[in-house]
Image (tube, rainbow, N blue to C red):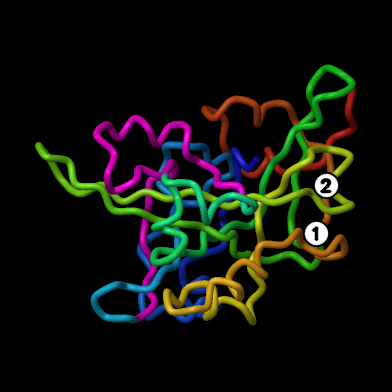
Amino acid sequence: MCGRFVRFTNADVIGELYGLRSVPSLEPGYNIAPSESVFAVRINPETGKREGVMLKWGLVPHWAKDPAIGNRMINARAETVADKPSFRDAMKKRRCLVIADGFYEWRRKPPPSQPFFFKLAVGGPFALAGLWERWQDPKGPVLETCAILTTSANGLMTPVHDRMPVIIAADDFGRWLDPGTDAAVVAALLQPAPDSLLASFPVSRAVNSPANDGPALIEPVIPA
């Protein structure tokens, strides 16, 4: 799964990298957790243009009666996303890129659990495959939410966890975002990242609490 990630690249750089005319003011986050707002790139359904938006992490399907369902919809499995009622409409029409500078995963064995930080080997931000939804509260405003897709772990990730988030390569941004992309093409993008793409190292267990934030969380440590 992917349950915590990092984003600290400034808005101007993100706008240039992802072809956005404007990017909202972004505060760095070194321990972004489910239910928080995350920055994503999507195609605006009205204009057909790319836009940067803030989405609540935890997808609420448009047909849901209670938005609390989003608390358990933070990830969608690549292997089943096209068939699951909670995700299949979004997979067809509402795909997005969730922008990150890294993510955390926990090695559970041997105990105690040890968090690891994963980032691009060359540094810089990258795009996680996401889905987004718009839910109308009968008594309030529209709620826009998202989920991050996961796939089987690559060789680098396997010693830590058996799943990893799907990373979309820059050459594939257009195909992933375009709701007209053929389903077979989209499915082919949901692969583990090459082992050489990422680097990882153990970090402080302070990241275990979402209340903790700051760049010290991504500093390497020597496990106890």
Q: Do the numbered discs 2 and 1 sit on residues whose CB atoms are within 8 Å?
A: yes
Q: Residue at x 54, y 52 (%)?
A: 81
- Mark 1 residue type: Leu
Q: Position of residue 45 (x, y in %)?
A: 29, 72
Residue 149 within the segment the image draws in magenta: no
Q: Residue 198, which numbered label?
A: 1
Tell me the crowding category of disc 2: few under 14, some 14 to 19, or many 20 or more residues within 10 angstroms, Cα based.
many
Q: Which residue is mark 2?
A: 157
Mark 2, secondary structure of its residue: loop
In the image, 111 versus 132, the foreground residue is 132
Q: Residue at x 86, y 44 (%)?
A: 158
Which quadrant is home to the C terminus?
top right
Q: Is residue 52 left or right of residue 152?
A: left
Distance between mark 2 and mark 1 Cα atoms: 9 Å
| Quadrant in the rendering for residue 25 | bottom left
In the image, 24 versus 150, the foreground residue is 150
Q: Position of residue 151 (x, y in %)?
A: 69, 51
Q: Is residue 111 above or below residue 198?
A: above
Is label 2 or label 1 in front? 2
Q: Is residue 198 above or below residue 152?
A: below
- Mark 2 residue type: Met
Q: Earlier in the sequence, mark 2 or mark 1?
A: 2
Q: Which residues are magenta?
A: 49-77
Q: Is residue 208 above or below residue 112?
A: below
Q: Residue at x 79, y 38 (%)?
A: 161
In the image, 138 versus 110, the foreground residue is 138
Mark 1, secondary structure of its residue: strand
Residue 58 within the segment the image draws in magenta: yes
Q: Position of residue 103 (x, y in %)?
A: 67, 47
Q: Residue 150, which numbered label?
A: none
Q: Position of residue 30 (x, y in %)?
A: 59, 44
